[in-house]
Amino acid sequence: MKRPLRVVVAKPGLDGHDRGAKIIARAFRDAGMEVIYTGIFQTTEMIVRTVIEEDADVLGLSILSGAHLHFAEEICKALREQAAREVLVVMGGILPPPDIPKVKASGVAEVFGPGTPTSAIVEFVRSRCAAR
Amino acid sequence: MSSADLDTWRRTTLAASLGKMPQRKPRFATLSGIPVDDLYTDARGTDPRIGFPGEYPFTRGVHPTMYRARPWTIRQVAGFGTAENTNERYKYLLAHGETGLSTDFDLPTLLGYDSDHPIAVPEIGKIGVAVDTIDDVRLLMKDIPLGEVSTSYTINASAFVLMGMYEVVAKEQGVAAERITGTIQNDILKEYTAQNEYIYPPAEAVKLVVDTMEYAAKAMPRYNPVSVSGYHIRDAGSNAIQELAFTLGAAHCYVTEAVKRGLSADFVAPRVSFFWNIQNDFFEEIAKFRAARRLWARMMRDWVGAKDPRSWMMRAHAQTSGVSLTAQQPDNNIARTAIQALAGVLGGTQSLHTNSKDEAFQIPSEGAIKIAVRTQQILALENRVCDVVDPLAGSYYVEQLTDRLEEEAEALIREILDRGGMVRSIEDGFIQRQIADTSAAFQQALEAREEYVVGVNVHVDEEGELPFEAFQLDPDLAERQIRRTRAVRRSRSAAAVGRSLKEIRRSAEAGTNVMPAVVDAIRAQATVGEMCDVLREVYGGYRGPIIF
């Protein structure tokens, strides 16, 4: 039997707005995934360590502070260097449209803006992980 | 004191108020010329639970004349980049008719880190203004007459530092202590449950709040050292009952902690102010303000034993709901905001922020913020909603909603007190779990289309993304801010800073009020990060329970 997908949901930096992170963590859990929510105030090192120690398939980053470019680049680079296998990175939050191609170029697979149904996010993660 | 009938109220409470602050016009009338009285009641006088405005239980408003004497304060929150950037925005707002100021600070300032701390650098000036030293506050308030314009600071964990900086700068401007007005949010309890910008453990943080209340009551008697905030609790996903209960519960906690310290309730309670969210359920929001006033009056008079009527008054700022804004079809936000603003006004708020249509995705552009200010001016000047006090009193629906909200909120506050109080209910996650459950249930209802958001899950436009005026931060701001802070560190007296920081530590360890030492350190140009670090060493940091 295949093990359930393991998802780390993380809030990088100093941003405390966690309503979205909690909603998506709950949605992943309700969809049968194993969810590790890091809580707030996470540095790049803390997030990468959690992903590796938890052997996660997916990392969901929630950022509403405007620091998305910095963290997308730093976290994706550290994962490529340190993780033993490929980790699907998705991001949720408020990003100005011109920044979305930039975070995708850093290695974020998809950005989910405000108003996205959680079912669409769950579906995206499932299909991407199944395709591997 | 409460009047038995309308004539008594007019002879006593109203007459006393008019002596101090007359009405805006000698006579008020509708557009058709029908006279508009100062107050409408039922034929018998009134139900004591509804009462008269300006009298216990204040259901109908904290002032006898409300907006007939003076409309609410138009107070738009602003803050981004460096102090110079935000000062320029203040001048723009004042030039367009804003009547009070309000400041948002960036994340490093909110969390007590200097701009050159490695964790701070990616966040400098992004969601608010960066402040490291007294020099930044001098620039922020430059040319703003602090004796005339009241200013609110949205800051909590490091509020003890910013309140001290505000006092020092106001006094440098020559404003006498008893003329300094303004508000600092300084409501730390809702940080642990909603906004999550905390530094110290909850009990120590509440002690700091009481320090500022005690200090301000003497040093700046007209200043509001705490603005207890339901706003964030609501935007984090709670409902109106939870917003009322967790907010009034927090305010009760601050006042009772002050009383435990030996201060009288009437020494601190008159300067406790509130900050509410205005969400989309129009009538429930109006009833919420009325229920909050009545419940707070009773809590202060009967639960705490406050004797001064000013201690019983729930004075409030309000803001239209940020979380109700949509990034899709952003022009719709103008309509949402206007209707929410009307609910706040019908509820009797003392000051109001209306969100800008682009705030779902950025710091508001000048064009968008102007529409938001104009929305308030249209309400005040065209719609005549200022001419009659509490116009919905006596509505079967609004009165029953007011009663129900008060009952349900009181039951929840009593439950929290029975399980050990606010701090305990934060440490064990009781409050966070309630908010997370309500938030998740609403999300499910949206996805099942049992609740609607126009433009998001109904009446969706397929084409086009975000036709808006983009707001751009100055790309060099982080570098400029770090340079300024480092220049201050080089030029100040290191010995004086060292002595003053040691004094903060001594005071914190002894459990005495840290504020006098903090104000000395501010004058010696100690940084926000240095002062907060001393208390980090004494009090420790905090990680809340992980709940989702």
Image (cartoon, coloured by chain):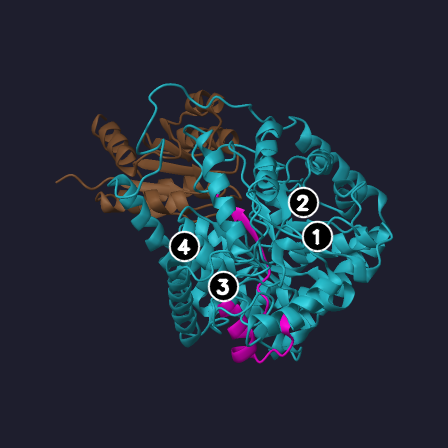
Under tag 4, what secondary structure?
helix
The answer to whether one can see residue B490 in this image is yes
Q: Are marks 3 and 4 on the same chain?
A: yes
Query: Residue A96 in magenta?
Result: no
Give the alpha-carbon distance from disc 1 to disc 4, as whole Å: 45 Å
Of residues B238 and B316, the one nearer the viewer is B316
Give the alpha-carbon distance from disc 3 to disc 2, as whole Å: 38 Å
Residue wearing tag 2: B114
Q: Are marks 3 and 2 on the same chain?
A: yes
Kind of residue at badge 2 = Asp
Chain of the residue where label 1 is placed in the rendered structure: B
Residue wearing tag 1: B530
The quadrant the N terminus of chain B occupies is bottom right
Chain of the residue where label 2 is placed in the rendered structure: B
Under tag 2, what secondary structure?
loop
Q: Residue B518 location, x and y as percent?
A: 75, 60
Kind of residue at badge 4 = Glu
Task: Check if mark 1's residue and mark 2's residue have beta carbons within 8 Å.
Answer: yes
Q: Residue B276 location, x and y as percent?
A: 52, 54
Residue wearing tag 4: B284
Colour brown maps to chain = A
Of residues B377 and B547, the one nearer the viewer is B377
First in sequence, mark 1 or 3: give its number: 3
Residue wearing tag 3: B292
